[in-house]
Image: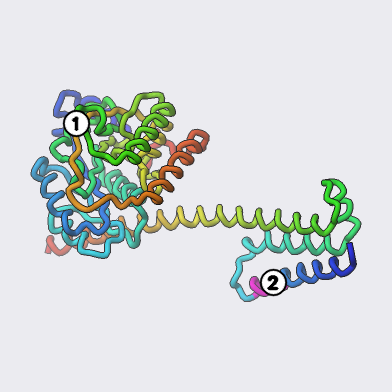
């Protein structure tokens, strides 16, 4: 792992990523309808990116559609939830020697044309985790008030804990280097809103975070799978988890050479 | 505390011990998970029969009615058993996740190697 870190730092200039191997991690659950077009759009922007679709126990043709669109498909035997699925993607990316992995939602919310924005800081070695934030730019988002309040609360809470201002902790449009990949492959939060916990975790392990402004689109397909009671439950769970994570034992050694 | 309460409590504890013993004997319960239950049964049995100890205990913690102390001790053990099971479930679900992930990754690798073989022929 250490060699690749050094390698990344030396390949300094912009478009540093030309020489780097990129993996897109797309967790998917019953998204047969649109997954192919989301993959196609990404491949149009950057054909060199390897698309890893983690099928989290879909009962439709998600896996077949993704394969047809040219993605590497990993099928989980049963539903693990978004956290477990994303983690599987990180495990695959780590095992297969990718230099940078980024998360991309299967619902078309993340615009692949903005890929460079989150990849560049990581490619230049300025950050271990780059998070695309909706709220740093000028664009307005139509977000229901309850959710907006919760998001703002998470942002404040996480900023306080990681001692760095972050505006969009629930954004899953994020890129990581091998160092962060290694952490997430070993340990990743479960359930929804896992990005909030993952951010705190990354900071706790001394990873460098950076937020970059991106614009996101309205969800092109489907609806959020979160209902109000469910969202409240997860919001509560995340607050508790974040609080406990402050005191949790650190048990992944990032410096150690593995494999 | 009447003799009757003692006898009923002792009987219940014995029944619990008998059930646990039978579950272990028929291999439906692993010893490691039965230990806490066995301890629960034994402690309740001892306190039910050894009435001096129960009175001393209830006096010490300010419970006026000794059979309540028996109840409290029993509840405490049940709480401990439940907490223990929560940790066991957490560990199992963690391992379950890891297994599912490893299985998925291995299947993927198998598939890749299968493809390589067919294409090299």
Crowding near the residue tagged with mark 1, few <14, some 14–19, many ≥20 C-alpha atoms within 10 Å = few
Task: Give percent across and percent down for residue A114.
Answer: 16, 35
Which of the image's four quarters has the N terminus of chain A? top left
Q: Is residue B22 highlighted in magenta?
A: yes
Q: Which is more toward the observer, A116 or A211?
A: A211
Q: Position of residue B14 (x, y in %)?
A: 77, 70
x and y percentages locating residue A8 in the rendered image: 24, 29
Tell me the magenta residue range.
B18-25
Count residues near mark 2 (Cα–Cα under 10 Å), then give few for <14, some for 14-19, many for 20+. some
Residue ID at (45%, 44%): A237
Mark 1 — residue?
A139
Query: Does residue A210 appear left or right of residue B24 in this picture?
Result: left
Q: Residue at x 45, y 39 (%)?
A: A239
Look at 40% across and 50% down and name the residue there.
A229
SS class, disc 2: helix
Q: Is residue B19 one of those drawn in magenta? A: yes
Residue B34 visible to the viewer: yes
Q: Is residue A99 above or below residue A160?
A: below
Magenta region, main secondary structure: helix
Residue with the mark numbered 2 = B21
Q: Which mark is residue A45?
A: none
Count of all numbered marks drawn on residues in the image: 2
């Amino acid at each position: 792992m250490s060699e690749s870190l050094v390698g990344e730092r030396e390949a300094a200039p912009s478009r540093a990523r030309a020489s780097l191997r990129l993996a897109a991690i797309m967790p998917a659950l019953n998204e047969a309808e649109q997954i192919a077009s989301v993959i196609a759009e990404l491949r149009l922007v950057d054909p060199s990116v390897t698309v890893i679709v983690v099928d989290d126990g879909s009962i439709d043709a998600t896996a077949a559609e993704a394969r047809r669109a040219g993605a590497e498909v990993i099928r989980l035997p049963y539903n693990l939830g978004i956290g477990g699925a994303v983690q599987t993607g990180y495990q695959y990316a780590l095992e297969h020697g990718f230099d940078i992995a980024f998360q991309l939602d299967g619902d078309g919310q993340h615009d692949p044309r903005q890929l460079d924005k989150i990849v560049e800081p990581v490619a230049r070695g300025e950050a271990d985790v780059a998070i695309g934030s909706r709220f740093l730019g000028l664009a307005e988002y139509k977000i229901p008030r309850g959710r907006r309040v919760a998001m703002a609360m998470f942002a404040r809470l996480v900023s306080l804990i990681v001692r760095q201002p972050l505006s969009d902790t629930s954004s899953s449009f994020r890129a990581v280097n091998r160092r962060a990949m290694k952490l997430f492959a070993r340990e990743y939060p479960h359930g929804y809103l896992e990005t909030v916990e993952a951010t705190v975790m990354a900071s706790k392990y001394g990873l460098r975070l950076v937020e970059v402004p991106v614009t996101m689109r309205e969800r092109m397909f489907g609806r959020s799978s979160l209902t109000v009671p469910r969202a409240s439950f997860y919001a509560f769970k995340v607050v508790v988890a974040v609080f406990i994570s402050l005191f949790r034992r650190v048990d992944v050694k990032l410096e150690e050479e593995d494999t | 505390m009447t003799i009757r309460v003692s006898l009923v409590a002792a009987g219940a504890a014995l029944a619990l011990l008998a059930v646990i013993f039978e579950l272990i004997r028929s291999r439906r319960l692993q010893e490691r998970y039965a230990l806490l239950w066995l301890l629960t049964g034994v402690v309740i049995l001892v306190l039910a029969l050894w009435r001096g100890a129960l009175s001393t205990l209830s006096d010490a913690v300010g419970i006026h009615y000794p059979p309540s102390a028996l109840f409290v001790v029993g509840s405490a053990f049940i709480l401990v058993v439940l907490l223990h099971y929560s940790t066991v479930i957490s560990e199992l679900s963690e391992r379950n996740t890891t297994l599912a992930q490893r299985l998925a990754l291995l299947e993927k690798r198998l598939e890749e190697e299968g493809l390589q073989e067919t294409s090299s022929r």
